[in-house]
Image (cartoon, rainbow, N blue to C red):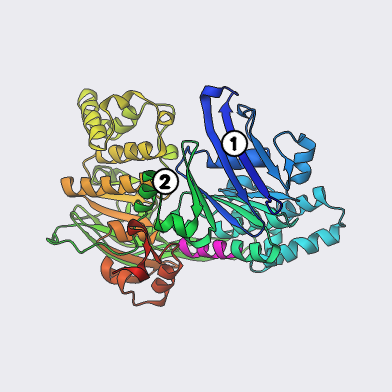
Amino acid sequence: MSDTLLDIRNLRIALNGENDKQVVKGLNLSIEPGQTMCLVGESGSGKSLSALATMGLLPPVLTPLSGSSIKLKGEELLTASPNRLRELRATSMSMIFQEPMTALNPVARVGQQIEEVLEFHSDLSASDRRKRVIEMMEQVHLPDVDKMYRSFPHQLSGGQRQRIMIAMALVMRPQLLIADEPTTALDVTTQAQILSLIRELREEQGAAVLFITHDMGVVSEIADDVTVLKLGEVMESQPVETLLRRPQTDYTRDLLQSVPSQVPRMARDGVSTDVVLATDDLCKTYGGGGLFSKSREVKAARDVSIKLMKGRTLGIVGESGSGKSTVARCIMRLIDPTSGAIMVGGKDIATMSQKELKPQRKNIQIVFQDPMRSLNPRIEVGQSIIEGPLNFGVPRSQAMDRARELLELVGLPASAVDRFPHQFSGGQRQRIAIARALAMDPDVLVADEAVSALDVSVQAQVLDLLAELQERLGLGILFITHDLGVAAQICDEVLVMQHGRVVEYGPAGQVLGAPQQDYTKALISAAPGRHWDFANFRPFAEAP
């Protein structure tokens, strides 16, 4: 106990303090200096609430029950005054939140936001504060730190914003760092850099890390010990090697076996010759410049040519800014391409007017990354599903009957038509978004990062659903992702993009199994958990 930095005992958190409404049910864990503990579980498991309770940031409706204890260096946090908790934050414990764009102030320069921590918690002069911030920004490997200091959050990439959050959390050199899903929305190379950075800072500063994630690949890369939560209850707590090799509960085994394998699936026989989508030298260029600045062109997509067959899945992979989502939006005509052809249903839709385009839209539909933002929160899901067919003249009663069929097709009850989006889980909402897309009976389904925000088990369910629907309906699927494991599991062909250009294109087994280009090799080598065969609970090096 004398070496324990954070000690959580019998932590029980309840809604409105009512014993029968517990959302965290007796959590016990301890962390020593220099140790990384991963808190793992699906959405609703209570892992983020446990972190917020440690920081004293629980919302008022959630209350730790009597007998709960959270001690930092022996000091009880649950009974500490608000002033004492403010003193401890940043100096003794800090937290990196999941989404830096919402955690950072959009109208303040990022350097000033880091400096605010020093202004509140130290007696440094203004010049010394700035010097310390610049040093911290260099320590988290940000480029051109003087420019970064003056930048606003929207001017930085996702990985750079996350580094700013890490710099802010570590500028006072706290002994405990809590990281709440800090890499979930990042591409594989940026994710690898952030994980390496956290390891490096832990070793240099001797900090303890409580790392919250649902990604078992990340767990295998960074954890010393792992605690698994399900619906607020601890399933098991083990050293990482023991947990990955010999999980003790069915729940942990299911989590591990839901991790998408990085080994490409076997090539499927019977390739159709029916082309449902093709592009030829597709380009998208953005022009900039203002009254007092020179025009600047950004080529977001350059000479992209693809061909998607009926019943096949083509994956487009790459880092943030590679142009993969730009290509998807051009194909959907959500933005207009600068040049090139887009063939859907045998017709070039690239230069069609909106009036000409309307009859063609039913042939190609899209499923977005976040269904909560793409579904109207004010109307029942049935109304969202029938909106497209109604616009094409389908009678309301017929469209609603079809909506009920589609909900059952995607694994939801027909009665769900009368419920609102907020009444469903994230995975269920994504199923509804898929049902809405299928309501138009499309030939092509574009899935733009459609599973990246989901838990691994829910992700596996949605991927299985897409494969089943493809088999049943003959859909051609254009799958946009930064997760190479997902691409390996679902794609027949893979196209790799970098800076708007096609780097490599071919069968998934060839591109992901035996890549030819250095960039593709770098992407694969950066993927977390690439050395583990999670389904068989062993490293790939030990495969028979």
* Amino acid at pointer 1: Asn
Q: List x then y, in percent, for residue 424.
A: 39, 32
Q: List x then y, in percent, for residue 103.
A: 62, 46
Q: Which residue is under mark 1?
A: 10
- Tell me where the magenta segment starts and ends, as one range: 186-197
Residue plotted at (52% across, 25% down)? 21
SS class, disc 1: strand
Q: Main secondary structure of the magenta part?
A: helix
In space, the residues marked 1 and 2 are separated at their CA atoms by 26 Å
Vertical comparison of 316 with 460: above or below = below
Q: List x then y, in percent, for residue 50.
A: 58, 40
Q: Earlier in the sequence, mark 1 or mark 2?
A: 1
User: Which of the 4 image quarters holds residue 513?
Assistant: bottom left
Residue 95, visible in the rendered structure: yes
State yes or no: discs 1 and 2 in contact (Cβ < 8 Å).
Answer: no
Vertical comparison of 513 with 414: above or below = below
Image position of 203 (left or right of 187): right
Residue 455's tag is 2
Q: Which of the two residues, 498 or 291, is positioned nearer the viewer here?
A: 498
The stretch drawn in magenta includes residue 521: no
Residue 307's tag is none
Q: List x then y, in percent, for residue 399.
A: 23, 28
Residue plotted at (41% across, 32% down)? 376
* Amino acid at pointer 2: Asp
SS class, disc 2: loop
User: Which of the 4 image quarters holds residue 304?
Assistant: bottom left
